[in-house]
Image: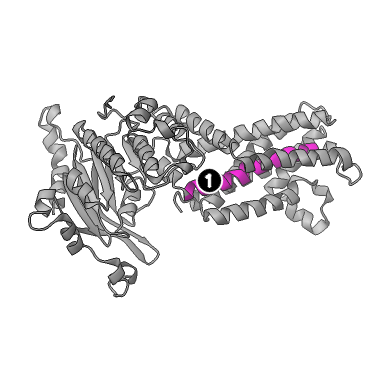
Amino acid sequence: MCWPAARARICRSGPVAAGRTLSLVPEPEPLVIDDLHVTFGHVIALDGLSLVARQGQITAILGPNGAGKTTMMRCCTSLVCPDSGTVSVLGHPAGSPQAAEATGLMPQSAGAWVNIRAGELLHYMAGMYADPIAPELLIDVLGIRPFARTTYRRLSGGQQQSVNLAAAIIGRPRLVFLDEPTAGMDPHARHHTWDIIEQLRADGVSVVLTSHAMDEAARLADHIWIVDQGRVAIDGSVAELTAEASLEDVFLAHTSDRADSWDTPSSPSGRH
Amino acid sequence: MTTLDLHPAPRAASPAARIRNHGLTEAKLVMRNGEQLVLSLVVPIAILLGGRFVGDRVGLPLSMLAPSVLALAIWSTCFTSQAIQTGFERRYGVLERLAATPLGRSGLLAGKAMAYSLISTLQVVILVVVSLILGWRPAGSVIAWLPMLVSVILGMSAFSLFALALSGSLKAEATLALANVIYLAGLALGVMWPLKDYPGGLQAVVAVLPTTALGESLRAWGAGVTLWWPVLSLALWTVVLALISRKVFRWVS
């Protein structure tokens, strides 16, 4: 696990920084999640989740449905308050104005008023920032122009995702959360989205994405965290994880099959 | 193809700009909604027409109905429309997205307050014009304007906070159903009829409702009477509903 090392380095950053020139002061890691516990009634959603996303990297979080990925994302935007544990976003508490200003979120599906037009939503999002990327430029580059005047509810899943991606990056963020960014996209849109995500990294933006697509994670990610039943099952670089088996095999070996676990007492809903 | 410069340079707009941005967008979206238009204008105008032509015969003259209809417009927009809109914003994950923007929670609430105050004010202006055309002549008293205006602002706040408490704690469908039932209940309890017309036992209950406070305040103003107790009642309701909505409001359903 990388986690204890990462924590140790962050804890040392104060005194170390004091003795160095400014350019060598380490920036806080964009996302540090430490021992997060969240329960909803009797259901344990997060059970000691700890992970870190590094500056300027693409970090992928994989896990079966119900593993706790969406709950984790919601903790990062402070929509869900953990029972215990901490989340640090760009060195600030989750949900703080400093974190919200520098973070972009691409929510999973929906995430918009049904009767807002795609272009209107982007102009609205741009209005939250003093120096946003021009909405019309994003509309052209991300191929949104043909449906910019269509209401959000009439867009296909893939078109909604394109609008959501544009909305996530419009405020020139340091860190973006992408929740299943290519779900529902056709192959052209998918490759286009991958290009944008790679350009984000090239321009120094840290990216945290969740996905069910192993090829997507293998192509994009610098570091992968596989989450199961609310905690990290295994993590590493793509090369480390795929040294002896394909990423899909590693995923299957380290995560529980919900169809099986529903019958066993060790399923998440069975633990109290 | 044009390429994007994605180098990080995040800078939030000023709080005032963010609130204005949200308020104008939400107002535009709500007004685009057909059902909303029926609730906010067609129903009150129908009541005014009824008052103009048969009101005197059933003891509901235009002089009393016109200010009551203004209270109705504020009630339907700030409570019913806002509850339903916010319920579906939770359902569709709009609030989930907005929580991650610089708007912030207080910005969202201020933006919503701006949106619904704008729509209510627009409605009130239209309904006043329609009432005047139909022959309503409010009694003139300069001093009566002050408690009425304060009551209107407090009423908008209290109804909005009630809407947020309801929509922030129930499922969207339950909010939709309940908001309509409560809309009708409010209409019968205090918004449309003068307090003195309720029978003895019921009168004591109706007297404490915020709907009654706003209705009575507007009716008193229409008759040129200066009435202060509704201001106190609505101020108390605003505080109580603010505390409740802060406690029960959840951003995702």
The residue range painted magenta reads B66-91
Camera sees residue B235: no
Q: Residues within 10 Å of mark 1 (few under 14, many from 20)?
A: many
- Secondary structure of residue under mark 1: helix
Q: Quadrant of residue B56?
A: top right
Q: Is residue A130 above or below residue B115?
A: above
Q: Is residue A141 magenta?
A: no
| Residue at 86% over, 43% down | B60
Pick the front one: A115 or A233: A115
Q: Is residue A227 above or below residue B240?
A: below
Q: Position of residue B42 (x, y in %)?
A: 72, 39
Q: Which residue is mark 1?
A: B86
| Residue at 53% over, 53% down | B172
Chain of the residue on which disc 1 is drawn? B
Query: Mark 1: which amino acid?
Result: Thr
Q: Quadrant of residue A175?
A: top left
Quadrant assignment for the C terminus of chain A: bottom left
Q: Position of residue A216 (x, y in %)?
A: 22, 47
